[in-house]
Image (cartoon, rainbow, N blue to C red):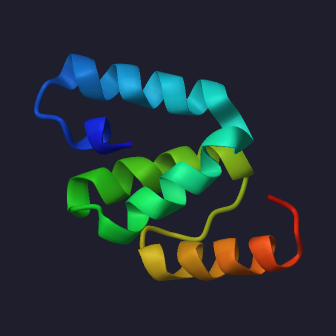
Amino acid sequence: VRALASKDTSEAGHAREVLLGLGADALPSLLRGLESADEVAAVEIIDILRQTTGEDLGFDPKPWLAWWRRIRSRGRH
């Protein structure tokens, strides 16, 4: 997840591909990363979350973190 903020576009692109390939298995790491991500990484993480989950909660991290807490409390992930 940290590699998404890399200035090396090849490294960031590879990280994106790996995370998308992991699908739902990447959710915990993505959401943990979102809590401390800079703006560039947060946009990348949220885009991956949108593609992985089918949810569209915008580009503010707060709704995504609230969504994750709800999902975890239901025992889905």
Q: Residue at x 72, y 51 (%)?
A: 53
Tell me where residue 16 appears, x and y as whole percent.
43, 30
Tell me where residue 4 appears, x and y as whole percent.
30, 39
Quadrant housing residue 36: bottom left
Q: Residue at x 73, y 52 (%)?
A: 54
Determine whether, in the image, residue 64 is placed left or right of residue 70: left
Q: Residue at x 58, y 31 (%)?
A: 20
Q: Residue furthest left?
A: 7
- In this rendering, the answer to whether 53 lies above or below 56 is above
Tell me where residue 42 appears, x and y as whole percent.
34, 59
Tell me where residue 33 appears, x and y as whole percent.
40, 57
Determine whether, in the image, residue 59 is placed left or right of residue 38: right
- In this rendering, the answer to whether 39 lies above or below 52 is below
Determine whether, in the image, residue 20 is placed left or right of residue 45: right
Quadrant of the image for the C terminus?
bottom right
Which one is in front, 12 or 43?
Answer: 12
Determine whether, in the image, residue 16 is placed left or right of residue 9: right
- In this rendering, the answer to whether 12 lies above or below 24 is above
- In this rendering, the answer to whether 20 lies above or below 26 is above
Q: Residue at x 47, y 56 (%)?
A: 46
Could you tell me how many numbered marks the image carries? 0
Quadrant housing residue 66: bottom right
Quadrant of the image for the N terminus?
top left
